[in-house]
Image (cartoon, rainbow, N blue to C red):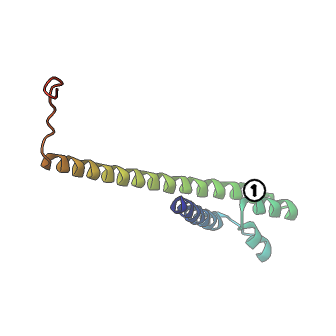
């Protein structure tokens, strides 16, 4: 249980960092003052607030586009990670099945007696 919770927290942190980095890199903040550009790069909501308060409506479309691009990349990364985990799980389960089959092959066969022989 603890391993799953720690793994989920680390996964969320890594994916969130990737999302924020891609969003910040894709966002076009040309024409904005330094502090406003920095604030807009923090999140899509911050970019919308900066656009609303500064009257820079040209920031809305690039903010939405950068966010959608970043989310698309996150979904691709999640898909690749899920595929890798599935393949790893399948390989592990096939290895366990093969080991059981080998262990069963080395053991003597089980003999069952008819019911009337035991009497």
Q: Locate the C terminus by quadrant.
A: top left
> What residue is shown at x 46% (from left), y 52% (from top)?
82
SS for tag 1?
helix
Q: Closer to the camera, 4 or 102?
A: 102
Q: Closer to the camera, 76 or 15?
A: 15
x and y percentages locating residue 54 in the rendered image = 86, 65
Q: How many numbered marks appear?
A: 1
* Residue 38 in which image quadrant: bottom right
- Which residue in the protein does label 1 denote? 60
Q: Closer to the camera, 99 or 7?
A: 99
x and y percentages locating residue 48 in the rendered image = 78, 58
> What residue is shown at x 31% (from left), y 52% (from top)?
91
Q: Residue furthest front?
A: 119
- Asked whether, in this view, residue 44 is left or right of residue 85, the answer is right
- Asked whether, in this view, residue 46 is left or right of residue 19, the answer is right
- Asked whether, in this view, residue 30 is left or right of residue 112, the answer is right
Q: Residue furthest bottom?
A: 34
Q: Residues within 10 Å of mark 1 (few under 14, many from 20)?
A: some
x and y percentages locating residue 4 in the rendered image = 53, 59
> What residue is shown at x 72% (from left), y 67% (from top)?
42
Q: Residue furthest top?
A: 116
Q: Closer to the camera, 93 or 13?
A: 93
> What residue is shown at x 13% (from left), y 26% (from top)?
117
x and y percentages locating residue 90 in the rendered image = 34, 49
């Amino acid at each position: 249980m603890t391993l799953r919770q720690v793994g989920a927290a680390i996964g969320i942190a890594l994916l969130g960092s990737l999302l924020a980095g891609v969003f910040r890199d894709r966002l076009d903040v040309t024409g904005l003052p330094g502090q406003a550009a920095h604030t807009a790069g923090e999140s899509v909501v911050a970019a919308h607030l900066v656009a609303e308060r500064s009257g820079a409506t040209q920031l809305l479309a690039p903010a939405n586009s950068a966010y959608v691009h970043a989310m698309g990349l996150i979904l691709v990364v999640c898909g690749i990670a899920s595929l890798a985990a599935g393949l790893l799980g399948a390989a592990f389960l096939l290895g366990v099945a093969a080991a059981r089959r080998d262990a069963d092959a080395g053991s003597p066969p089980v003999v069952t007696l008819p019911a009337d022989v035991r009497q």
